[in-house]
Amino acid sequence: MASAELAGQIDFEGWRKAARAFRLAGVEPAEARFTVAGAVDNRSLFDTAPSREKRLGRRAPETAFTVPKAFVDIAQEVILHRSADRFDLLYRLLWRLRDEPDLMKVVSDVDVLDAMERAKNVSRASHKMKAFVRFRMIEDEAGEAYVAWFEPAHRVLEKTSGFFVRRFTSMRWSILTPDGSCFWDGTALAFGPPATAADAPQDDEIEEFWKTYYASTFNPARLKVKTMQGEMPKQYWKNLPEAGLIPDLIAASRDRTDTMVAAPHSQPNARLSKAIARHVRDGSYEEGFVASTLEELRHGVQACRRCDLWRDATQGVCGEGPVRRAALMIVGEQPGDQEDLAGRPFVGPAGQVLDAALSEAGIDRSEVYVTNAVKHFKHEARGKRRLHKTPVASEVSACRWWLDQERRLVAPKVVLALGATASLAVLNRKVAVMTERGSTLPLSDGSEAVITVHPSYLLRLPDEAIRQKERAAFVADLKLARARMGSTDDSVAD
């Protein structure tokens, strides 16, 4: 029997070098043994089960060979699997590729199917690590740092570490696992030995905030316990601070749902509801209608039928601000639930975030024209609640008719687009917000566009450090827009 010792459990290069040498020498799978230095259990699949290759006799040595990229890709994943026989499975596939060069395309083959399933399990473990790592803050001689303890289903620490570098570039952090540890100092990533749960902090101040946030976003009306446990397997609960809340939240879900359903819904703005009926009845809006004033435009929007969003919305919500020559126009995505009922843009939670950021950036909202790319609230009914749904491109395109008229009537010097939907409406193309933010883009009417995130994005961030970082970037984008505004002396109040 030919034997090769690998440097570690995920030593792919060591395995590839040994496997290549074995195949060139004609070593059949039944005669190949791969062990890991220092491992307690180095049993091979073929220590207990003879293979069919054993009965075929020894093959003649080869001088060279190649394998398809598909095999290399899947092998790099499978080697991260915790199964003891993974090296044997991969070598068996490598051996069979000699006589079956298209083997990796035969997805019904037992060995190929097995390898694909293990690779899928590894990919799933990597995804769960991204979702369920929870950092806790500590203080050391260099200041704040963050440490997390995680027990991945498979050995995916190195595979997944790049995600955390990209996600938490400005933080110093460590992730400890039973397989090894990784450390990011803000500049370089390093790996270390295995750790235990006792090596990680047990709680911190931010954790209570996170648990409060998690409980506040728990929607009992949408609770599906089996689905939740499928996405958040119980094996991870012991290391998730919010998991301790789940049993009580589930137990109270029926009562909370009954309370939500029994609560009376908010009443729409009666005056504007009558205005909608009047304009639809007298036909004051027609296809091709061009408004000469913002007041005419508001009436036209109430009777707009350019897409079907009007059917479920309370009313159309136009912009508000100076009548003409507002130096800055801010364009959001669409009215939310509160905006739909009030008939005004940005009066809900996202509007409060926007107002605070505008103030910090030195911008007076009363001198800014604030509107949305889409004028009707697109939503999905859940009991008495209306849950936001993102408008599709065709709906954004249909509503651009009104946004273009607002821009013509207001004539802003700078248009600040909040998020991807608003950017699509302003620029008439898809925009990578995180890539194109922080710069000015010329528009066909002589004004300039500045791209940034939507305030609701900041509301969804659970991590305090990341939220503060992203909020600072948002304010910086607002300051850029302010710098491009110039004088607003010619603004006239609405």
Image (spheres, grey):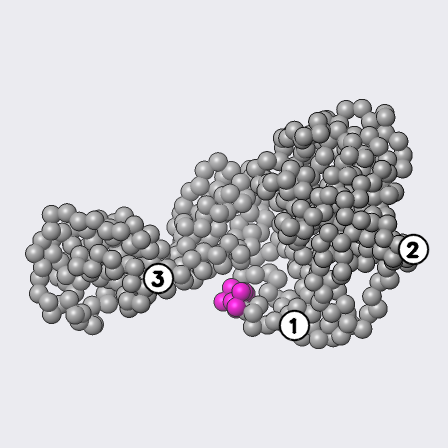
Q: Amino acid at mark 1?
A: Ile
Q: Given this view, does label 1 or label 3 mark the residue nearer the observer?
A: 3
Name the mark nearer the viewer: 3 or 2.
2
Tell me the residue that label 1 is attached to: 250
Predominant SS of the magenta segment: helix
Disc 2 designates what residue?
Answer: 271
Q: What quarter of the picture does the N terminus occupy?
A: bottom left
The residue labelled by disc 3 is 116
In-front residue for pair 370/472: 370
Instruction: Reply yes or no: does residue 336 show up in magenta.
Output: no
Residue count near mark 2 (Cα–Cα under 10 Å), binned few <14, some 14–19, many ≥20: few
| Image location of residue 172, percent across then percent down | 53, 42
For residue 426, which numbered disc appears in the image?
none
Pointer 1 with pointer 3, Cβ within 8 A: no
Q: Tag 1's secondary structure?
A: helix
Disc 1 to disc 3, C-alpha distance:
36 Å
Residue 353 in the image, given as x and y percentages of width and height: 75, 45
- Which region is colored magenta? 230-237
- First-in-chain label (3 vs 2): 3
Task: Return the residue nearer the eye: 341 or 165.
Answer: 341
Name the residue located 73 percent from the left edge and 51 percent from the top edge: 306
Q: Secondary structure at mark 2?
A: helix
Would you place residue 337 above or below residue 243 in this image? above
Residue found 74% across the figure and 62% down from its top: 386
Give the position of the C terminus as an image quadrant.
top right
Amino acid found under the numbered disc labelled 2: Arg
Residue 121 found in image quarter? bottom left
* Earlier-in-chain disc, 1 versus 2: 1
**Distance from label 3 to label 2 (Cα)?**
62 Å
